[in-house]
Image (cartoon, grey):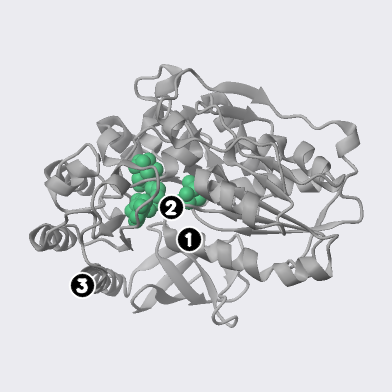
Amino acid sequence: MKQNYQLPDHGAERMRTGSAKRITFSMTDDLRHLGQGKTYFIRTYGCQANVRDSETLSGMLGMMGFIPASGPEDADLSIFNTCAVRRAAEEHVLGELGSLKPLKTKHPEKIFAVCGCMAQEESMARLIAEKCPQVDLLFGTHNLERFPQLLARTLSGERTIEVESDGAGSVVEGMPVSRSRRYKAFVNIMYGCDKFCTYCIVPYTRGKERSRRMQDVIAEIRAAKESGAREVTLLGQNVNAYGRDLGLADGFSELLREAAETGIERIRFYTSHPRDYRETTIDVMKEYPNVMPALHLPVQSGSDEILKRMNRGYTIGRYYELVDRMREKIPGITFTTDLIVGFPSETDAQFAETLELADRCQFDSAFTFVYSPREGTPAAAMEDDVPAEVKKERLAALNEKIGFYARRNNEAEVGKIRKVLCDGPSKKDPSVLCGYSEENRLVNFTGENIREGDIADVRITEARSFSLNGEAVR
Ligand code: SAH
Ligand code: SF4
Ligand code: F3S
């Protein structure tokens, strides 16, 4: 299978210069009938950036006349929007692609597409291009806007691979969106990441940090609000750096204020970075009650030495200071975080500092990960010298501590009345409703005449490890 395509190049990604191209999306008339009578299915892995990209793909497919199907068996077109952040995520996708082979043999007319962060990785793109003939279309995060044209090529019988990027990336406005929930909207405020934490693949798969113009972001929030959104989540790999590329000194605080001024009921943002946090942002969070008092603030490690080797750009002292100041200024604010164990050279003593951090910060919950080397990142060149067994033990010890505080914080909720945005019946038990409180705690509750998208006052009656039970009081 000889193909002409250019693979992504991680070395070049590090050298990127220049500013982002600004593009307005449009779709030519000949593409608008491409999906007539056809169905599609999208499986999304990874973070909210991918979830939002899948909503864009759904929007484009809708414009082309495709309608949704429930799985690859029923769909004419199946798209796998992939994540490359850890090896396990990739293995999952490769397994899934393998399991599609018999379906493709039986139904060669079905189209399988792979996109997202794995497509933007040199070795994965090569592997899929060369070893997965069941994949008809492979495109990267930088080629999202060209998806309709690429799909047209695929449908005309050409195996299509488009994974190159110019590093600086682009900012595309005017793309359609089909949101999975009317009352909750994800809104990108920026793309890419320039932080280059030494373990992380994201700056390579998502390109340079680049911001949308403030008026475009606010227009999207207003439009979402008009079509029924009650909660908006502002998305970026490091939202606190918003607007720097536009020459704004304190862009995120300004944007957050403007977003709050739209009057939308709930605003969240994701992800924050301790390095770029500004006092003015804390002030806006305090001033506007529609900015939710729940913060995801990844810390990664409790050891200054490890933080330095991770290139995180802050000390643990600075992290504590930030958390303390926010708790003081915004009473009731909750914190969640991300933690990595077993980073190269992490000693028992350094890991003990991470346990100490968990005691000190008493997070509501945390995503905990075992370090996974990512090809082409600086950490991958460090010796991965913490034995697998030790990594496993550290993860278990950390999870136990995180679980202890999660449960304890949940127990302190019993008896309180919280405002819960209802997501409809719980998946585990359809006889109860579920949703999230302002503090971002998952609440399962009973109540009459409450529909998806309603905000209910719920009395918390019971604490569980990772959720709360309650009953609606009105
Ligand atoms: N932009 C976000 C995080 C994106 S990735 C931030 O900076 O916080 C989500 C999380 O995955 C990270 O916070 C980190 O904890 C974890 N992660 C990233 N690369 C990893 C790797 N190579 N091994 C293990 N965990 C990793
Ligand atoms: Fe990865 Fe660090 Fe960027 Fe987050 S800030 S996406 S962890 S490089
Ligand atoms: Fe994964 Fe890409 Fe997000 S690597 S975590 S889907 S930015």
Q: Earlier in the sequence, mark 3 or mark 1?
A: 1
* Camera-side residue of 132 and 270: 132
Question: In the displayed structure, would residue 136 be above or below residue 441?
Answer: above
10 Å crowding of disc 3: few (<14), some (14-19), many (20+) = some
Cα–Cα span, label 2 and label 3: 23 Å
Q: Amino acid at mark 3?
A: Ala
Within 8 Å of ligand 3, the CB of disc 1?
Answer: yes
Q: Which mark is residue 85?
A: 2
Mark 1 in CB contact with mark 2 (< 8 angstroms): yes
Number of numbered discs on residues: 3
Q: Image check: 108 left or right of 333?
A: right
Q: Is disc 1 placed on a helix, strand or loop?
A: helix
Q: Which residue was labeled with disc 1?
A: 89
- According to the picture, the residue beneath numbered tag 3 turns out to be 397
Residue 409's x, y, as percent? 26, 68
Instruction: Give the residue at x 56% y 25%.
Output: 215
Label 1, label 2: how many angstroms apart (C-alpha)? Answer: 7 Å
Relative to 328, does residue 76 appear above or below in the rendering?
A: below
Closer to viewer: mark 3 or mark 1? 1
Q: Residue at x 25, y 73 (%)?
A: 396
